[in-house]
Amino acid sequence: MAASRKYRIGYVIPGIGLTLEEAERRKKIANKIVEHSSVDIVCVDSGPLTIENCVEEAYAASSYLSKIYSLQDLYDAFVVGCFGDPGLRAARELVNKLVVGPAESTLHLTSQLADAFIVISPLTNTVILTKHMIHSYGFGEKVTAIVPANIPVIEFIENREEASKKLAGLILNTVKEKGGDAVILGCMSMGYALVDELLMDKTNLPIINPVKVSLKTAEMLLSLNLKQSIKSFPKPDYNKLKHLLD
């Protein structure tokens, strides 16, 4: 396959809290990350404004399923645009295209770079969501701490140096107290603020951005002609789902 071949990746937002302006900004960043693909930001018609608790996560998990089902002929792969990977298994069963979860792909990649690592969660009340997700993927023993940043993402865009210094201090203190050889940004908004590029020189640790990892993972698996196993993710009875998918 020629290197210039363009894959089409749908980056799906599982909720309605993203403005059109922010969606366009993220599209530009996403297309700078990939090399042999084009990325569209796929917005849904209903769902939570944010994903900060189990209730919102549950609504988010189904918010995009009918959307990707209807769009699957347009894309080679989908990325679930939330670090919690809501609805990931269902999405993989539903569509015939590759579906990548940012958290899953980032945790696996980071485990190749470090024996132990910390995860930065955006808020105090998202720590529990992150904790359950990490344990469900089997990485509980590798994650030494899940730390809430409690810094508005807009600060990383408008006051980049000050916000990054604050977060770097939090990271270094956590690593000193809890251990850890790398850092995962457990938030796609932090990823799109390119916080990893702000922190790398301030911590001397690998800072792993789930936006970059998930998009690059999708691109890599597409180049290898790989997608999820139909045995692990069996197809549902579409006739029973017709009233939900129309």
Image (cartoon, grey):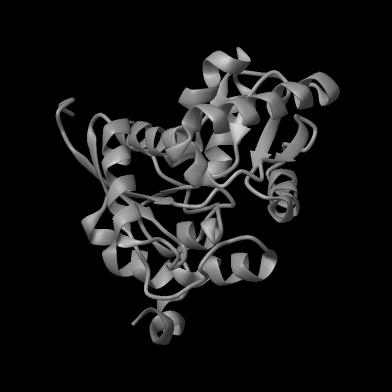
Q: Percent from the top left, x then y, of residue 202?
A: 58, 16
Name the image quarter holding the C terminus: bottom left
Q: Is 227 placed above or below 16 here?
A: above
Residue farthest toward the bottom in the current orientation of the protein: 243
Q: Residue at x 73, y 49 (%)?
A: 127
Q: Percent from the top left, x then y, of residue 49?
A: 51, 68
Res. 130 visible in picture: yes
Q: Percent from the top left, x then y, of residue 200?
A: 53, 18
> Between residues 131 and 244, which one lies in front from this camera angle?
131
Q: How many marks?
A: 0
Question: In the visual, does 98 lie left or right of 145?
Answer: left
Q: Residue at x 63, y 31 (%)?
A: 167
Name the image quarter holding the N terminus: top left
Q: Is 7 placed above or below 75 here?
A: above
Q: Quadrant of residue 148?
A: top right
Q: Residue at x 52, y 45 (%)?
A: 153
Q: Residue at x 57, y 42 (%)?
A: 104
Q: Is 104 placed above or below 243 here?
A: above
Question: In the visual, does 58 lie left or right of 191?
Answer: right
